[in-house]
Image: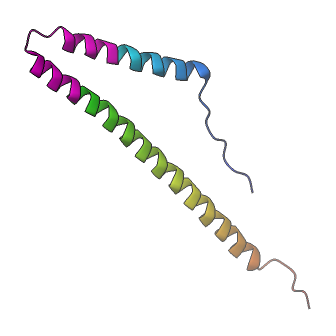
Amino acid sequence: MTSPLQPRNSAMFYFQAWISFAVSMAAVGIGIAYLPVSAWVRGFFAVGALYLVTSSFTLAKVIRDRQETEAVVNRVDQARLEQLLTDHNIFRPESV
């Protein structure tokens, strides 16, 4: 039984993703810091941005975990089907 190739990301892809994340967080942080409003409003926006980031990480993890679980279930189902087909092969000579 052969398993499909798992896609691998390059080191540059990870680097680009982290740089993009850092730049976007810095831009939001600077934007919030320089808003012409009171400290309470800036604090509210900062907490809101932090909550948005943490919930995005959680959602990404949940989606990844679900995808991995479905891949395992599909592999188990495929193994069961192959075993069933092997056990009931009509072209196999009957051993007496």
Look at 65% across and 70% down and name the residue there.
80
Q: Is residue 32 magenta?
A: yes
**Image location (x, y in percent) of residue 6:** 63, 41
Q: Is residue 20 left or right of residue 8?
A: left
Quarter of the N terminus within the rendering? bottom right
Instruction: Say which of 38 and 54 sits in front.
Output: 38
Q: Is residue 29 left or right of residue 34?
A: right
Q: Is residue 25 left or right of residue 74?
A: left
- Above or below — where is 68 with respect to 40? below
Q: Which residues are magenta?
A: 25-47
Instruction: Say which of 74 and 25 sits in front.
Output: 25
Where residue 92 sits, quadrant-wise, is bottom right
Look at 9% across and 8% down and name the residue there.
36
**Image location (x, y in percent) of residue 27:** 29, 12
Instruction: Say which of 33 and 17 sits in front.
Output: 33
Asked which colour scheme the image uses, the reply is rainbow
Where residue 75 sits, quadrant-wise, is bottom right
Look at 20% across and 15% down and name the residue there.
32
